[in-house]
Image (cartoon, rainbow, N blue to C red):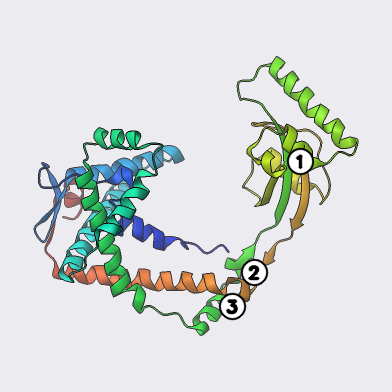
Amino acid sequence: MQMKNRRWFWLIVKLMCLIWIAFPALAAEKKNLAGKVAVVNGSLITQEDFDREMIGVKKRLAKSEKSLDDSQLLTIKKKILENLIDHELLYQESQKKGIKVDEAEINEQWEKLKKRFPSEAEFKTALRKVNLSEAIVRSQIKRGLVIKKLIDKQLIEKVTVLTKEIKTYYESNPGSFKQPEQVRASHILIKLTPKADESQKVVARKKIEEVQMKLKKGEDFAALAKEFSEGPSSVKGGDLGYFNKGQMVKSFEKVAFALKPGEVSGITETRFGYHLIKVVDKKPESIMKYEEIKDRLQQYLKQQKTREKLDIFIEKLKGKAKVERFLNEISKSQK
């Protein structure tokens, strides 16, 4: 199903409710920090809070190799500031409603956070590098959890989706439920590094040719994959499962989609090395049936409604709040 923004709900939780739980964005104590970018009903949002979020954005942009002009960068900065303001308003509202969390809930999130690191020692080292203590982190986990409870209570529990709405959406958006052509394939891989020299290529080529000869003599593909393949799928007899176009490297994909079920390719080279590919099954492009998708579609529509209600809820909070913005570039753009 190709519904755009179908994962927006989890972005709400991460960006607005649990923004401080994700390790790179854990906040330091605000009261002791110099500089402010906003004040929300007397509570500071610091320059350090803002900078921390900007660092995350810049890292993502660097990975995607995208560049932004001044206008686009200003738009992103405005969005980051508003997200921080929204988070503060939601937290303040949760306190007015008397929402609390117990230690067991905080401990559960704390343990999940620790498990993101190979060891407790590395976790503690990472905390020290960004000047954070356990007390500060646990405090911010608490903030995130009470906001999540606020949204659950005020919005999510009150949202309903009728069967009629689900059917209407399904019938009005047939393009959203296209299932692209898929192939299920297995492979046997003999690895090559990108810096492999000619002698290493010769050795690898000889290995894959020997496996190819065994296949031609009638030996089982899955058994050979388990014995000789150097890829992670070897334990499953080389099985890669079903995949669409665009999920594999082009040279591999081109061969796989050209084969018929039961056929084995010739030796195929990719940046990973030499492959023998066997297509197990093919599924043509199709439209997902209503019965297959109705439960997920109900959840999607509920999330969409909740998003709309959350926007309205936050705007109402802003309407009653005193919010001052001090970020220079943004303040100038709003004059």
Front position in the image: 165 or 293 = 293
Q: Which mark is residue 171?
A: 3
Nearer to the camera, 184 or 85? 184
Question: Mark 1: which amino acid?
Answer: Ile
161 sits left or right of 236 in the view: left
Residue occupied by mark 2: 288
Residue at 24 percent of width and 34 percent of height: 128
Residue with the most extreme right position: 217
Residue that appears at 31% across and 56% down: 18
Structural crowding at the residue carrying mark 1, measured as other residues with C-alpha within 10 Å and reported as few (<14), some (14–19) or many (≥20) = many
Report the front residue among 295 and 127: 127
x and y, in percent, of residue 170 in the image: 57, 75
- Sequence-first tag of 3 and 1: 3
Distance CA(mark 3)–CA(mark 2): 12 Å
The residue under label 2 is which amino acid type?
A: Met
- Is label 3 in a helix, a strand or a loop? helix
Q: Earlier in the sequence, mark 3 or mark 2?
A: 3
In the image, which is nearer the foreground, mark 3 or mark 2? 2
State which mark lies toward you, 3 or 1: 1
Q: Residues within 10 Å of mark 2 (few under 14, many from 20)?
A: some
Residue holding disc 1 = 277
Q: What's the residue at 64%, 43% (across, down)?
A: 248
Determine whether the residue tagged by mark 1 lies in a helix, strand or loop: strand
Q: Is residue 201 above or below residue 68?
A: above
